Image: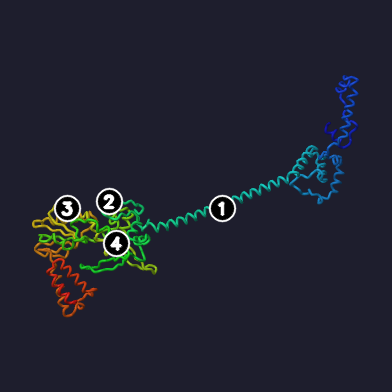
Amino acid sequence: MGFWNKLKAMLGLGGAEQGERAPDGTEAERAGRGGAGAAPAQARRAQARATAASAKPRPADPYDARGILGLSEGELRRRALEINPHRTAWIGRVDTIPPQSDERTALIDRGLILRGLLTEAQIAEIHRIGDLWLKHHDAVRLASALAARSADEAIAQQERERLARKEEKRRQSEERRKQRAEAVARRRAEDIIYLGLDVSAGLADRRSQVESLAGRGLPVLSTPADVARALDIPVPRLRWLCFHGEAVERPHYVYFEVPKRSGGTRLLAAPHASLAAAQAWILREILDKLPVEEPAHGFVKGRSTVTNARPHARRDVVVNLDLSEFFPTITFPRVRGVFHRLGYSPAVATVLALLCTEAPRRAVEYDGQRLWVAVGDRALPQGACTSPAISNQVARKLDRRLAGMCARAGFVYTRYADDLTFSAPPGKRGDIAMLLARVRHIVMEEGFAIHPEKGRVQRAGGRQVVTGVVVNDRPSAPREEVRRLRAILHAAKKTGLAAQNRRNVPDFEAHLRGRIAYVQMIDREKAAPLLAALDALTG
């Protein structure tokens, strides 16, 4: 059926031919060829199909527009004006296609067809799609909402997970910080890893030469904790005794100045009790067990100023030289080297060297606070019991070189602390200049310096004195000292000892006994009457 025939059928304009379709010529010929007997049977079958078709209800076409397609344009306008647009649910909707059952929509469709803008098939397809949208748009909206909600939940979950990870990282970081703090506190209580600027190098090296130490009869120490146990003090206390600060509120020493015989003052440093005890242990357990060179007589058991002077008795020429700034020249690195060469690990050598050295300090006021500021390098302090023994160890190579040079040149060499003494038999006076030049060269190479104003050349024609002992004939006490002591004791018989203490020396009696003991060490015969006179005065 063509478009116009279908349109006529829908509008009720067709004739009898609308219901049935006449058989064409081909069918008639087939019917004729079938014979007279086949015609009744075919007729019956066709009638039965027609009856069944008329009895079976036809499904309603959802897009049947026959109710409006027959309207004229005028009728269309009239019916459109009768519609109240505010009573329809589809007015103003742009999110969907209204169904064809809506009267206003049906009129619009008719108008579109009348105008030739859309065909019937197009209108039907539009409404089919619209019905599908109306049927499924809630599902799409719900799916979109669910997707959006799922996305929001996923974002929220990601945020919660991110915050949880952040919190876990913070907790782990806090735990690591706490563990580090505990480890640092534990290590500070058990070990020492830093003792100040420029002095802490080597504290991580704990390798001591055990066999070398044991062979020397020295205590085997490898770590700072070993030193603390040997000194019987806690590690934190050892750290304070060793720590080097450029400006400190409480120094390890008490500083004071004493006058020199040659003029000026000498800065002395007396260690605090705990540091003095540690230094006494080092001296007793380590330094006193070390050998010294034969020419060294200062601060060595069994040797004294007398043993230092005796090799120069009855010599033609005696030369006295003085090392300039002897203790300050022996700095912290040189002291650390002494202990390291013994076999101690760099860590132990550093700790022992810090216990035995100190920087010269001056008190300053800063921001209302009194501070002791280092004004020089760490070196052997005047007043520490370990300084003389360490100086003998540092000067061992100096002693060997000077003794060897003098042996080849026919001179005799001894050293008492910073006093160098050389003597020669007759016939060597012409070699004195050569001797002095070589001595200065060797002393400089060994890290020391000759004091330019304290050298003396004493010949046999005058008095020859070595470390306060007269050596022209045999070692004897200086006459001036014996006469001064005799005069003090004689005057004290009339005025008492206190009146003779013109310099306000503390414990003047002990002072006199010390001076008499020095004379007695050199010459017992001269000291005997002096000691008897003092005993008589003191009862």
- Amino acid type, mark 3: Gly
Q: Is residue 360 left or right of residue 79?
A: left
Marks 4 and 1, how far apart in space? Answer: 58 Å
Provide the residue designation for mark 4. Answer: 279
Please identify the residue farthest to the bottom as the structure is shown. 494
Label 4 or label 1, whichever comes before in sequence order: 1
Q: Is residue 361 above or below residue 128?
A: below
Question: What x and y, as percent, mark residue 33?
Answer: 87, 19
Label 1 or label 3, whichever comes before in sequence order: 1
Provide the residue designation for mark 3. Answer: 404
Could you say whether the residue bearing mark 2 is in a helix, strand or loop? Answer: helix
Residue displayed at 18% across by 80% down: 495
Select label 2 or label 1 by which is in front.
2
The answer to which quarter of the image holds residue 180 is bottom left
**Front-most of residues 123 and 238:** 238
Label 3 or label 2, whichever comes before in sequence order: 2
Q: Is residue 30 above or below residue 272?
A: above
The answer to which quarter of the image holds residue 326 is bottom left
Instruction: Report the quarter where the C terminus lies.
Output: bottom left
- Amino acid type, mark 4: Gln
Could you say whether the residue bearing mark 3 is in a helix, strand or loop? Answer: helix
Local crowd at mark 4 within 10 Å, few (<14), some, or many (≥20)?
many
Label 2 or label 1, whichever comes before in sequence order: 1
Are the two marked residues, 3 and 4, in contact with CB atoms closer than 8 angstroms?
A: no
- Amino acid type, mark 1: Ala
Q: Which mark is residue 212?
A: 2
Instruction: Report the quarter where the N terminus lies.
Output: top right
Q: Is residue 135 left or right of residue 297?
A: right
Provide the residue designation for mark 1. Answer: 164
Marks 2 and 1, how far apart in space? Answer: 59 Å
Local crowd at mark 1 within 10 Å, few (<14), some, or many (≥20)?
few
Are the two marked residues, 4 and 1, in contact with CB atoms closer than 8 angstroms?
A: no
